[in-house]
Structures are given as C-alpha cells and as structure tokens.
Image: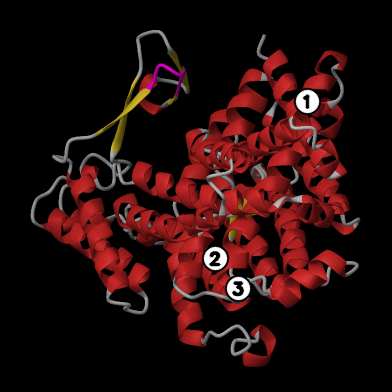
Amino acid sequence: MENFFKLKQYGTNVRTEVIAGITTFFTMAYIIFVNPQILSITGMNFQGVFVATIIASVVGTLVMALFANVPYALAPGMGLNAFFTFTVCGVMKFTWNQALAMVLICGLINIVITVTGLRKAIIRSLPKVLQSAIGGGIGLFIAYIGVKDAGLLKFTSDPGTYQFFGKTPADATVVANASAVPALVNFSNPAVLLALIGVAIIVVLMVLKVKGSILIGIISTTLIGLIEIACGVNPHAFYPSLASNVNSIGALFGTMSITWSSIGSSISAVHLTAFKMDFPGLFSDPTKIVLAFTAIIAFILTDIFDALGTFIGTGRRTGIFDENDEKLLLSGKGVKSRMDRALFADLCATITGAFVGTSNTTTYVESSAGIAEGGRTGLTSVVTAILFALCLILAPVVGIVPAAATAPALIVVGMLMIASIADIDWHNFEDAAVAFITVALMPFAYSITTGIAFGFIVYVLIKIIRGKAKEVHPIMYGATALFIVNFIMLAIKNL
C-alpha cells in the first residue's frame, strides 16, 4: 500500500487517508438521494438512476484513485443534472435518452481534448490572477453550499415569477427569477440550530488542532441530532423526506431494515436506464440540430472547467500537485503528471455515467473536505469509493447523517480555501476586477464554470481595452469566444 500510493512521499499515512476518505464521502453522500430525484423528473426510473449514480461514482472514484493517485471523489454533478433535466429535457424538449447521448458525446470529445494536450495548454494559458481567483472563488462557493445546506437562508419570490417542474406543487422543483430575495432565517428551526452547533464544534476542534476535526464534527453533530429526535424533536426537521409516521428514534432506525431482495430489485432496475442512449433521435429533427450542439457545447465547457477549477483551486496550495508534477504537466508529453491523469479519470467517469444512465459524472468540489483532513493520495478515494459501493446495501443508514451535520464541514473548508485571494493584487484594478467577477459569480450563479467564464471574458476585454491584447494567450481568446457563443446560443433558444 505504501509503495503503490506513496504515502510517505506525500506526507500522509493510512489513518489520515481513511479519515479523509470517510469525511469526503459524508459531505457528498447526499448525491445518491438527490440525483435520482432530479433526473426522475425527465421520466427516468428512480431506482435505475439510484443504482447508476452509485456505479458511476464508484467507477469514477476508483479510476481517480488507482490511475491518478489523488484524493478526489466523483459523482454525477449537481448543476449538470439540473441542466440535463430542466434545460435539455425541459426547455429544449429532448428525451432523456437523447440527453444521455449528448453526455456520452461530451465525454468522448473531452477525452480527445485531454489526450491531444489541449487541456494542458489551457492550464498553461491561465494568468496568475485567474488561478488565484479560481481557488478563492471555489472556497466561497463551498462555504455558500454549506450555508445553504445548513438551512440558514430563505428565499422570497414575487407572485407569478416562478414555475413548477413536477407533477404537483408538493413534489415539484421550483424555478424562480431574479425577484427571489435571500434572507437569514430565524433560529427556531432545530436543524438550523444543529448546523450552528456543528460549525462551533468543528471550529473549536480546528483551533485546538485536533486531528480528524471535520469528521469528528460530522459524527458529533449527527449524534446530537439523533439524541434530539429521541427526546421528542420532530424528525422532519432533520429528515424532511422521511415518511410522515416517523416520530421517534426507534421509528427512525426502523426505516433501516435491509433485505437482499430489495437490493436485487434495485440493481435489476438499472437496466431501465443503462445503454438507453438515443443517437439517431438526437439528430433526426433538423430544426433541433442547433439546439443539440448548443447543449453539447455547454456540457463540454462545464466538464472541462469544473474539474480544472477544482484541481487548480484545491491541488496546488495543498501540494497534491507539487512542483515536479507541474513541470511534467507543462512540459511533458502524454498523460504523465498526476493532474493529467486526474483530468483523464474525470472524463472516463462521464462516459461511464452515460452508459449506466446518469448525467455528467464529475470531480466533486466537496472532496476538499477530505483534503482539509489531510488526504493526499488515491487511498482517500479508495475509501470513499468503498463507502459508495456499500450504499447499495446501507443507503438508509447513510441517510442518518443529515445535511445539518455535513453543512458545517463545507463552511469550514470554505474558510480554509478562500485564502488564495490573498495572492491577488487588489490595489491593481485590472486584477481586482477580474478576480472579483470570478470569485463572486461562482456562488452567485452556483456554478464554478460560470465564474471562470466571466473571469475569462472580463480579463480579455480589459487587456484589449488597455492595448495589451498581445499579452493574452491565443487559447484564452478561443475559450472566451466559446463561452460567449454558448451564452448567446442559450439565450437564443429561450426567445
């Protein structure tokens, strides 16, 4: 194990890696429940997507672990599954089978982009200000995810400014326009109070430099929540999706009965989504070919820059991608550096997801929680993958950990990651404008790629206006043009 993962070389050990892997898993385990809920809106089978989510996560994470030897976990991406459901299938009116075909095309094209060295060239072309801004933006984005998951925010929309996607308002997803105004909730909700307690626990442990602070915080917060339920707190505060008759700790554990027959039925359900891509139908309607290419470009850009942003934002500062690795990345040929292999693993996961029946599988920014616990090698990812595989049997047990327990971990990790904005020269308005747009739009738009896209656009525009167009790498011009074309096409299709 030492020789394969090179634990000593990266300054870690088995215990640290195991704790990191468990931490990463619990911060992103929600996806095995949320992804089927979102994709089933398209008509996909819920159980089939549930199993497909686990298979794609396990395969992608193991490839990342064993091929790239880095501590990142993969799963169907939030945001990408929403784009798949509400834009591609909802607004553009493609079937989910056709959307899966788009996901596979995206993965294949991105593999070509990676193997030919174009992704490597993109990294070389990034100016320092954007590299620092991406790291800081991801930190703020992670913290915002934590704040939102903790239930600290509520959103108020004006009448008539929102629409439902679902059979009934009770089980539908609500999409509102810019009239939605966020505000701090009151602290009468037990789940919100539990999340605040979790933040306090982790912060205190971090200050005291206790090893495993984040994992201890998640476990402690979960236990406190279970104790509260045992003392009579309504379990719906922590587990809103539980059946209405769950009103005690005993009833909560009663929901965890596992039978091999139910596992078998879940696995057999995956055939309802696996290998169901519809390539002929995707291009059969001439009036929708432009829309199809628009969606594919959007998938490609998001796949490229979500993973790239996550690796740049978390890998360099922590030493996962060290100086030697960076030299191999920038000057070596083929897939030799850890980041090269990590990017390749990310794309293999997307292809796997398309085959088994789920939206784009991508590197999760929540992996930073495990990295903050000291995870530095693929052993962290192996542990996470094993836990994902066990979810075929123990999914109800995993559901014991509420969002109120994992949200504090993300908030604290965000605190750690935002440090990279200190490397930005905020007194230089050119750099400040680029950095602010990049950092701010990641949480505001709830998308790493959107923040990067606008950072690229603003950077190029400023250089042109200042008469410094020659300082911009040609790849920056090309990527910026693609981003602009993508935004224009997405706007046109909504007219």
Q: Tell me the residue that label 3 is attached to.
A: 319
The residue stretch that appears in magenta: 175-180
Q: Is residue 177 magenta?
A: yes
Q: Tell me the residue that label 2 is attached to.
A: 389
**Residue 10, position in %: x, y?**
60, 83
Q: Is residue 36 left or right of residue 452?
A: left
Gap in Å between the C-alphas at discs 1 and 3?
36 Å
Give the total of numbered labels. Answer: 3
Gap in Å between the C-alphas at discs 2 and 1?
40 Å
- Which kind of residue does numbered mark 1 sit on? Val
Which quadrant holds residue 277? top right
The answer to whether residue 274 is seen in the rendering is no
**Residue 352, position in %: x, y?**
72, 54
Q: Secondary structure at mark 1?
A: helix
Tell me which numbered mark, 2 or 1, is placed earlier along the sequence: 2
Q: Which mark is residue 448?
A: none
Q: Nearer the viewer, mark 2 or mark 1?
A: 1
User: What residue is shown at x 33% (from left), y 72% (from top)?
Assistant: 213
Which quadrant holds residue 215? bottom left
Q: Tell me the residue that label 1 is attached to.
A: 485
Q: Is residue 15 magenta?
A: no
